[in-house]
Amino acid sequence: MASELQILQDRFPFLTLFQYAGEEMIGVVQNQGKNVVSCYVYNKLTTPEQKKLFLELAQVWWAESNRKIPINLFFRSDFDIFNFCVCNFVAKEFKIISGHSVSLHTLNHKRVKRRRVELIIKDK
């Protein structure tokens, strides 16, 4: 299983393998909050076309974003076709086995301002 997991993470680093209520699932975490985790569950996709498009869009998100903003905000309406596979989980029972997680809570921190000090030598 470890080698299969490593191959999965090498090929699709944007996918998250997680466990909920004793069941393992694969998906892209939309947002991990204090009480609720929202995730696009790959297991709910039915057709090969849906799966291919999902993986292609997720690959674009992974390559072109800073990976801190959720995939649905990055694509806006292009990712709405996958709203049927969004599941909300209780955070206490949600366990990430491997993969990436996004949390909007981390974006809320203030940035530290850097000050620039210049020393000027005056001629007499």
Image (tube, rainbow, N blue to C red):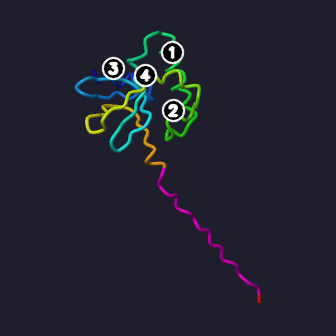
Q: Which residue is mark 3?
A: 4
| C-alpha separation, residue under disc 4 versus residue under disc 2 | 14 Å
Q: Residues within 10 Å of mark 2 (few under 14, many from 20)?
A: many
Q: Secondary structure at mark 1?
A: helix
Q: Is residue 111 left or right of residue 102?
A: right
Are the residues at dot 4 and dot 1 in contact (C-beta closer than 8 Å)?
no
Which numbered disc covers residue 71?
Answer: 2
Q: Nearer the viewer, residue 23 or 76?
A: 76
Label 4, secondary structure: give it.
Answer: helix
Q: Which mark is residue 85?
A: 4
Mark 3 vs mark 1: give the one in front: 1
Q: Earlier in the sequence, mark 3 or mark 1?
A: 3
Image position, residue 98 (x, y; %)? 34, 31
* First reached walking from the N terminus: tag 4 or tag 1: 1
Contact (CB < 8 A) between labels 4 and 2?
A: no
Judge the density around disc 3: few (<14), some (14-19), many (≥20) Cα neighbours within 10 Å: few
**Is 23 placed left or right of 60 in the picture?**
left
| In-image side of 74 versus 20 (left or right) | right
The x, y position of residue 105, in whole percent, is 43, 47
Q: Mark 1 or 2, which is nearer the eye?
A: 2
The magenta stretch spans which residues?
108-123
In the image, residue 84 lies in the stretch drawn in magenta: no
Inter-mark Cα distance, 4 to 1: 15 Å
Query: Which residue: 56% across, 63% down?
Result: 113
Residues at discs 3 and 4 in contact (Cβ within 8 Å): no
Question: Which is in the foreground here, disc 4 or disc 1?
Answer: 4
Q: Tell me whether the residue at label 1 lies in contact with that at label 2, contact meaning CB atoms closer than 8 angstroms.
A: no
x, y percentage for residue 85? 43, 22
